Image (spheres, rainbow, N blue to C red):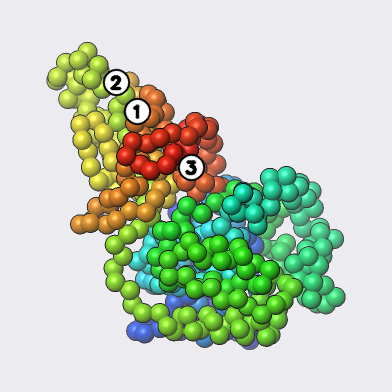
Amino acid sequence: MRLPEVQYARSGDVAIAYQAIGEGSEPDGTDIVFIRGLSSDLASTWDQPLLVDHVERLASNGRLLLLDRRGTGLSDRVREVPSLESTMDDVRAVMDAAGSERAVVWTGLSSTGVGVLFAATYPERCAGLMLLDPQVRGTRTDDYPWAPTVEESRDELRVIRSEWGDRAFLERRVREWMPSRADDPAFVEWFVWHMRRSLSPGAALTAQRMAFEVDVTDVLGAVRVPTLILARPPERDRARWVADRIRNATLVELPPFDDVFVWLHPGVHDACQDAIAAFIHGLEAPPPPDRTLATILFTDIAGSTETAARLGDVAWRDLLVRHHALVRRELARHDGTELDTAGDGFFATFDGPARALRAADAIRAALGEIGLQVRAGVHTGECEIHDGKVVGIAVSIGARIASLAAPGEILVSGTVRDLSAGSGLAFDDRGRHELKGVPDSWRVYAVG
């Protein structure tokens, strides 16, 4: 068979490999973005007939965009850990390159966080969300007992660090993940080389570390696009936990099977594809979204009253002009949107927490060079959209967190810290705080 042409989309400085299979989205078709797990390799995907069947059946519902995430397969290798935010950027870059305005996102397992965050952040570009055995938190907690413990995570990272790529290690993974294929030499051989081509040992380690750190539980309530959740019987309770927290979510339990991947079993695969087809063809054009997930940034100058009194009115006005110019420069550099300016304070939004944190850090450094100390607060939450502006409790939380910051300090909510896995940022716990006018107490962290 003639393989689909590999194309490349630019996501910042990174080239993302993708293939388009099936018909385009105009005028009445549907685009589907398939976000694979931690590993993917477009080239060797087409060497596995069972996986090819899965891809082609997905493409029977519309045009399928299949991509290799940054650091994997045919896409550029990167030094940093691919974060949820950078992976969202890659998905948008592929959609833009393929001329796709809106698409249904198909993902799950360890890549669930990307799909959830994309659907909540860009509802205008996500026609629907489909999740298989969703994993929304990487480490076990009392209310989420299905993830590995911290010690189990560390043990897994030690094994990956020392054994990834070794044949014995990958053959053991086949027995653990796909027991029905453990005695199929051709399948085992394909799997060994597919995984080697997908991830280098270092990339496998960083990708798995990020998966253990991810936590998108706070974002589930902000997903408002139609959502289909498919679950194997052993994962039913975890899938129900997720489905109960997403509006408009439908849970479909698949027939029993022992493997991780549905495309290994014809009967199960048929049930999966039937549910996907019914979901996609039942989608209706939604109204424009009136809510979205946004990251809120508040900044102000510490000790501004004292500084103004010391400098005098004219010098203070000149300093404010420089302050405003520097803040706006960094907002523009980090794709922030300025929403309000009051005196020496700024209110801005971002479509990702890491961008907001890097902007805050750059603002702190730039203002330090002109003798000013800034205080900043960052929070990610669901916001209402009114006349192009965002309002709601998330804005109040961001403002209250900023008010807790000391001079030169950037404080963030626990949600921001959880969503920044893989960003390379470090956080110091500042404990729980009561925020004026906001229910419950909130754990706050300082950016290192």
Q: x, y (%) of residue 310?
A: 22, 13
Residue 47: which numbered mark, if any?
none
- Of the residues under marks 2 and 3, which one precedes in the sequence? 2
- Of the residues under marks 1 and 3, which one precedes in the sequence? 1
**Mark 1 and mark 3: span between their CA atoms?**
21 Å
Q: x, y (%) of residue 87?
A: 51, 57
Q: Nearer the viewer, mark 1 or mark 3?
A: 3
Q: Nearer the viewer, mark 2 or mark 3?
A: 3
Answer with left or right where residue 410 lies relative to residue 418.
left
- Residue 356 in view, yes or no: no
- The answer to whether residue 257 is above or below residue 116 is below
Pointer 1 residue? 374
Pointer 3 residue? 414
Say which element carries label 2. loop
**Mark 2 and mark 3: span between their CA atoms?**
27 Å
Query: What amino acid is labelled 1 in the image?
Result: Val
Looking at the image, which is closer to me, 307 or 444?
444
- State which quarter of the image contains the N terminus: bottom right
- Residue 439 in view, yes or no: yes
Which residue is depicted at the point 27% across and 57% down? 385
CB contact under 8 Å: marks 2 and 3: no
In the rendered image, which quarter is residue 382 located in? Answer: bottom left
CB contact under 8 Å: marks 2 and 1: no
Which residue is depicted at the point 43% across and 66% down? 247
Looking at the image, which is closer to me, 319 or 74?
319
In the rendered image, which quarter is residue 68 located in? Answer: bottom right
Pointer 2 residue? 303
Looking at the image, which is closer to me, 241 or 353?
241
